[in-house]
Amino acid sequence: MAETNRIVRKYPFKEGYSIGTPGSNHSAEGPPMGTVAIYLQQLEAELRTPTLRFFRDVLWHFGVRIT
């Protein structure tokens, strides 16, 4: 919970959005319906949008994994 609070203070989200930690059966590859997964490293690198599936598929083709 302390880590979540630190992230929210450092990277404020727009009204109506919230941050949550994934459950043990969720991953960035398949987040729960109605949500997007963003890694903390993405926020720190200022990559604030989810990765496009096409871009992920191209990277996977060349053996690069984003996770």
Image (cartoon, rainbow, N blue to C red):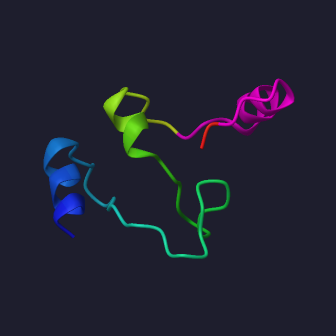
- Please check the rendered image and state whether residue 31 is part of the magenta-colored stretch, yes or no: no
Q: Give the side of residue 46 with respect to residue 15, left or right.
A: right
Q: Position of residue 5 (x, y in %)?
A: 17, 60
At 25% from the left edge and 55% from the top edge, which residue is drawn?
15
At 47% from the left edge and 47% from the top edge, which residue is drawn?
38
Q: Position of residue 8 (x, y in %)?
A: 20, 53
Q: Locate the N terminus by quadrant.
A: bottom left
Range drawn in magenta: 50-65
- Please check the rendered image and state whether residue 55 is part of the magenta-colored stretch, yes or no: yes
**Residue 47 sits in quarter:** top left
At 24% from the left edge and 61% from the top edge, which residue is drawn?
4
Q: Position of residue 19 (x, y in %)?
A: 33, 61
At 55% from the left edge and 41% from the top edge, which residue is drawn?
50
Q: Give the side of residue 49 with respect to residue 9, left or right.
A: right
Q: Compared to 64, does 23 lie above or below?
A: below
Q: Locate the C terminus by quadrant.
A: top right
**Residue 27 sits in quarter:** bottom right
Q: Give the side of residue 40 with respect to residue 62, left or right.
A: left
Q: Residue furthest right?
A: 61
**Residue 28 sits in quarter:** bottom right
